[in-house]
Amino acid sequence: MNSPLVTPILKSTIETQDIKTISFRFPGVIHPGQFFMVWIPGIDEIPMSVSLIQGEVKGITFRKIGDATTALYNLKKGDTIGVRGPCGHGFTLKGKHLLFVGGGTGAAMLAPIVELAQGEKLKSTVIIGVKTKKELFFEKRLKKSGAMVLVSTDDGSKGYKGLASDLANDVLKKETIDSIYTCGPEPMMKTIFTLSKGIPFQASLERYMKCSIGICGQCCIGKGLRVCVDGPVFDRNTLKNVDDFGVYKRDAAGRKILF
Amino acid sequence: MPDITTTIGSLRLKNPTMLASGIMDEDAGSMQRIIDCGAGAIVTKSIGVHARDGYPNPTVVELDHGILNAMGLPNPGIDEYGQEMNQLRKSTAPIIGSIYGATVEEFAFLAEKMQLYGAAAVELNVSCPHAKRYGLEVGCDPTLLRTITASVKKSIDIPVFVKISPNVTDIVDIARAAEKGNADAVVAINTVKAMKIDLETTRPILANKTGGYSGKAIKPIGVRCVYDIAQHINIPVIGVGGITTGEDAIEYIMAGACAVQIGSAVYYRGPDVFHQVCEEIKHWMRTHGCKTLTELRGVAHR
């Protein structure tokens, strides 16, 4: 039933100065790309992609940006949160050489699918795009999985200087990629979607969410696709018919906000 | 082939299933999907004069036999909502504009806008159980409700439906007030005021603490309300509350409803529930030798 499981935080790990991973016990199978609704009692309940899947222990990785994420950031081991889910559909592995592109905190939710791909002996190239070196996280973890990890920074403080989508374009020119997986700022994902035409493509979208069970309509895109239930991962065939993709999202009141 | 067309006053529907307000109806794309899934009519999100964010989450929690919500009337405001309505101007199903307000003037203003946007009717939300100053605070005062209904009726030419609440001492009194205000139909029921407390955190789960209960659990409450209302007023009644299957819809029709609205069942069965319920209604009619819905309407009163 879709109601929160109240569970204590097992571990809280600092990834960068404003990004943390917290883990907790949550029984059940989670497919990479699915998300939880995380309830911080008295504050809010927010969608959070799963960044860690280790048997019964699951984790989320997030940046401190608003009231809810700041409250979550300040919680300590043993404090309780409510976890509802898993919500939505995750990624599907297709092909032999896969390209993963994570922008900002997007790398967090790609990590479990990269690890799954490596476990299935597929070749993975991962691009982590951040503004600056200080914001980089999960590089070690992804390298440990055996994937080829490339870093791009906007300021050139580490790796490729420039946008993750430009680096992705370079990789696509040099390598034969069977499938692309991406999560991050939507304009970045839209750019990759456009420049990689023909190659199977899956993107994880983010929208303001309320019910997370497909009824309230808050997160709908295109012709009534519910990001919470029909997504959050959508493939190229679906996205090509979604006019909002990379163009606008909606605020809590349902007003359009251009990217 | 059984005929499942129906009428609500002057409004003709190809089938009796309508999308209930608040479910997948904040944008044109979602409403189009529900039309494509076979709904006979669409009721929009409840729209007010100004944009509202609604309450913080949790706004929805599933319980054993239903769904508890306190969304807090989120909507982009009537001006911005015009964009969504415009995209549905050529729609094959009637779009009914749901509106909420704090004053008589607000209701009349919103109704005029909805008419301008091409709405086939308006539905007055005077029954939201969890929004302060709006909804139920209007809908449990028969005199105020009658004044609002009459005022909206005078300001527009399209039909006016009034959606009423079960959270009152006598729902028939409220339905009568709508009728006296010249409403074209009464919609019953809105959600039932309820609460869920989490034992571990010792607090209500919903951020708003109380919310409205919908889904299977409230169907018998809705059926009773529709039965009582239909017996005492002479305008059409639209049944809503826990309708998930064709048989649920038929039960409401037997209680006196001319059409039904479906909301929570979009969760239980997905958006295709409209098509499924229609097929189930037809199947029931075939196996019971019934040709039209009119034959079934209100038969439980005999």
Image: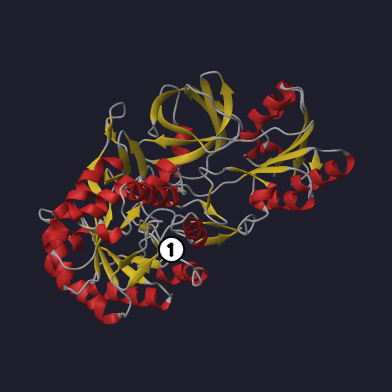
Quadrant of the rendered image containing residue B141: bottom left
Residue for point 17% across, 49% down = B224
Quadrant of the rendered image containing residue B93: bottom left
Residue for point 57% across, 56% down = A222
Q: In this view, does A85 lie above or below A198?
A: above
The residue pinned by badge 1 equals: B76
Residue for point 51% across, 43% down = A228
Q: In this view, does A61 lie above or below B268?
A: above
Who is closer to the viewer here, A153 or B38?
B38
Residue at the top extreme?
A: A55
Query: What is the crowding at mark 1: few (fewer than 14 residues within 10 Å), some, or many (at least 20)?
Result: many
Host chain of mark 1: B
Residue B127 on image: x %, y %: 24, 58
Amino acid under label 1?
Pro
Quadrant of the rendered image containing residue A6: top left
Residue A58 on image: x %, y %: 53, 24
Is A138 left or right of A99, judged from the image as shown?
Answer: left
